[in-house]
Amino acid sequence: MANKINPPELSITRNPPVGFHFAVVFFIGGVVPNPLDIRFKKVSGLSTEIETETIREGGENLSEHRLPKNIKYGNLSLERGMVIGSPLNIEFNVAMTTMKFAPGNVMVTLLNDQSIPIAGWLFIKSYPVKWAVSDLDAEQNGIVVDTMELAYTRFRILRI
């Protein structure tokens, strides 16, 4: 009779992480964390895609090969309630009015229930490409939301 070995219990397999507890850190000059602009309502655009090139095989043309070509990134989109006097808002305003950019790094971290980072995404050389403010509506009683969109050179997935 074979001994049955029970695999060690891993909390991550029993309880997958939730997506509502996260932090966003902007690094001033690419190094120093900005302690003021860290709270966001929603983060989207955490994706990457490999573009492929199709090459048809010669001769009978019965098959084709899809080869990796380039890595394609979408934009990182951040939503938060409007903040007055934010350094991030000032940086976005400068970029959107003067076309002068100061690319920096942005890190998004997923936190566990003790606020300890368990995963992260580092967006390298990011810069603003879109800034929108939610509609102002006298018939609604809602918070004014800023949506900021960033392009970036590349990103790294961090597993902590």
Image (tube, rainbow, N blue to C red):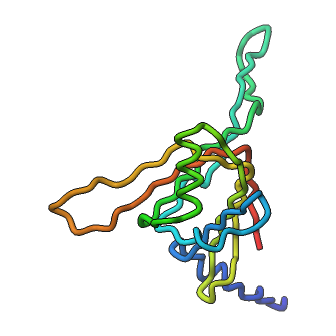
Q: Residue furthest left?
A: 139
| Observer-nearest of 148 and 155 | 148
Q: Residue at x 53, y 61 (%)?
A: 43
In this figure, what is the number of numbered marks?
Answer: 0
Indicate the position of residue 118 as horizontal and vertical percent values.
Answer: 70, 76
Figure quadrant of residue 121: bottom right
Q: Quadrant of the N terminus?
A: bottom right
Q: Is residue 83 above or below residue 70?
A: below
Q: Is residue 145 above or below residue 109?
A: above
Indicate the position of residue 132 as horizontal and vertical percent values.
Answer: 42, 49
| Relative to 100, 65 lies left or right | right
Q: Quadrant of the C terminus?
A: bottom right
Q: Residue at x 47, y 60 (%)?
A: 79
Q: Is residue 127 above or below residue 78?
A: above
| Relative to 23, 81 lies left or right | left
Q: Residue at x 54, y 65 (%)?
A: 86
| Relative to 108, 43 lies left or right | left
Q: Residue furthest top?
A: 59
| Observer-nearest of 85 and 139 | 85
Figure quadrant of residue 18: bottom right
Indicate the position of residue 58 as horizontal and vertical percent values.
Answer: 79, 10
Indicate the position of residue 85 as horizontal and vertical percent values.
Answer: 50, 65
Q: Residue furthest right?
A: 2
